[in-house]
Image (tube, helix red, strand yellow):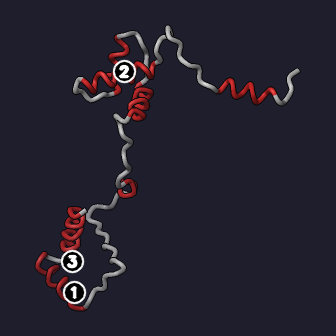
Amino acid sequence: MSTPATKPAAKKAATKKAAPKAGAEPSKSDLVRKLAKELKEGGQQPRPSVIVAELAKQGVKVAPAQVSIVLKKMGFRPLRKKKGSARKAAPKAAGAVRAPKPAASSAVSFEDVLAAKKAAASLGGTDKALAALQALKRIEE
């Protein structure tokens, strides 16, 4: 019968990683790291598909996801930034134009409205003027 004091010690011992032995085979992650470094030194981009194929020739089965994780941890494959996911989530109807939000600090004067009216007339209407302004906004971003 074991006492409660010995149970936590047993758990701690089980969670420690075993140190690799001198004569033991390298792990799959070690092989991926080694091959990725060789590819990088050879001037190639370390890609998961290339590494999986090369290790398969050596008789080692590795999942592409595992290779990708190891490469990310090595810094070869940075995480991608999510960009514009809100825009892609809700597709707009064809021809639908959303009015731009005015900035909090900018106030529109009566002269600005008259100038916008003249610009819209020269472009062929307010719809075309808004479309041109939206295109300009996308270019500026």
Q: Please, what secondary structure does the residue beneath circle 2 have?
A: helix
Where disc 1 sits, the SS reads helix
Above or below, comparing residue 47 to residue 116 in the picture: above
Locate the N terminus by quadrant.
top right
Circle 1/circle 2 CB separation < 8 Å: no
Coordinates of residue 80 in the picture (x, y in percent): 36, 44
Locate residue 54 relative to residue 18 in the image: left or right: left
Residue 70 falls in image quadrant: top left
Percent across and percent down for residue 111 are 20, 90
Which of 21/100 is in front?
A: 21
Q: Residue furthest front?
A: 22
Q: Residue at x 53, y 16 (%)?
A: 20
Q: Residues within 10 Å of mark 1 (few under 14, many from 20)?
A: few
Asked if residue 13 is positioned above or below residue 140 in the image, the reply reads: above
Using a 10 Å C-alpha cutoff, classify the residue at mark 2 as few (fewer than 14 neighbours), some (14 to 19) or many (20 or more). Answer: few
- The amino acid sitting under disc 3 is Thr
Report, in whole angstroms, how far the alpha carbon at label 1 lies from the one at label 3: 15 Å
Say which residue label 1 marks.
112
Q: Amino acid at mark 2?
A: Lys
Residue 126, label in figure? 3
- Front disc: 2 or 3: 2
1 vs 2, front mark: 2
Which of the two residues, 32 or 80, is positioned nearer the viewer here?
32
* Crowd class of label 3 (few under 14; some 14 to 19; many from 20; radius 10 Å): some
Disc sitting over residue 34 in the figure = 2
Amino acid tagged 1: Asp
Q: Earlier in the sequence, mark 1 or mark 2?
A: 2
Q: Earlier in the sequence, mark 2 or mark 3?
A: 2
* Side of 122 where 29 appears, left or right: right
| Identity of the residue furthest to the left in this view | 122
Q: Where is residue 120 shown, x and y percent of the image?
A: 17, 79
